[in-house]
Structures are given as structure tokens and as C-alpha cells.
Amino acid sequence: MSINLDIMLDWKSLNQFLLYHNYMRPSGIIGLVISIAAVVALCVEWGLWTMPQKVMLAALALLFTVLQPLMLLSKGRRQLQMDEFQIPFHYLFDENGVTISQKDQRQEFTWADVRKIVYRKNSIYVYMSSISAFVIPAAQCGGQFEDLVKLTREKRVK
């Protein structure tokens, strides 16, 4: 079985990936815990803090819950404006692995080269390293999303 897809990454799919990737890593989880702890400390012990301490706790509370997501969204917008994201990527998933091509460039990966695959409701993230992944939105799979999920699950297990 082989599945051919032409994917033009969109802002929503990329941002969902960036937020997922950032907040599912230990550093993202720690950041959220710090922000939540700052909110709790600020609210529970409001009268104990001096004004500079309140400002610092408020900044900590906003850092990982508001500022960092806004920075990630800005990063996604800049990334999508790059020339290589103006042309669709062609993906071929088959028995041997994944082939990605765009214009005259082509990369082939065996299933053993795939580091991790994350299945989300609306996308699949195919990680080739710990920091980068190919984002395959379900909406752009032309009805082949479930077949892709099945193929990648079968091949990744082996």
C-alpha cells in the first residue's frame, strides 16, 4: 500500500504542532507548573507580597501561559512566509518508508529513520529528530487520513 499526499502547511496546523511540541516536552511542562505556581502564590498570599514581588509573580504567571504561546505563533507565521513553505510538499508513504519531495529536492527515509510518530485528532506528526517533524494535517489527506494512520502504525511497530 502506498499513499501519495500533497501538503501545503497552513498556519493553524503549524501552530497546533508548535504548541503541542513545546508544551509536551519537560521544559514546557515545567514552565506551565512555574506559571501556575506563580498564579496560586499571587492569589493565595496576596497580602504578603510587596508590589515588586507581585509584579514579578504576575510576569512569571504570564511568561509561559501568554508570552511564550504568542512568541510561538509569531515564529509559525514567520516560518510560513519562507519560500519553501509557499510550495506544497509531496509525501509518499509506502512499505519502505517516507519520501518527501518539493521541486527538484527529494529526501527518502526508511521506517527505521523515523524517530517517533504522534497521532492527533487532526494531524500526524512524523518526527525525524527530537526537534523537527513533518506535519500532516488530516484535512489535506483527501480522505486518506485513516489509511495513513493505519500504514504508519503497522510500519512503525516493526
Image (tube, grey):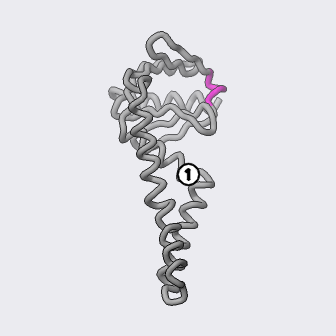
Q: Is residue 106 above or below residue 42?
A: above
Q: Is residue 143 left or right of residue 76?
A: left
Residue 112 visible in rendering: yes
Nearest the eye: 13 or 75: 75
Q: Is residue 105 above or below residue 126?
A: above
Q: Residue at x 42, y 37 (%)?
A: 78
Mark 1 is on which residue type?
Met
Please tell me whether mark 1 sits on a helix, a strand or a loop. Answer: loop
Q: Residue at x 50, y 19 (%)?
A: 100
Q: Is residue 116 left or right of residue 61?
A: right
Nearest the eye: 128 or 84: 84
Residue most toward the front? 52
Is 111 a magenta residue? yes
Which residues are the magenta region?
Answer: 110-114
Q: Residue at x 61, y 54 (%)?
A: 27
Percent of width and height locating residue 67: 45, 57
Crowding near the residue tagged with mark 1, few <14, some 14–19, many ≥20 C-alpha atoms within 10 Å: few
Residue most toward the top? 104
Residue 1 visible in rendering: no
Q: Which residue is mark 1?
A: 24
Nearest the eye: 85 or 90: 85
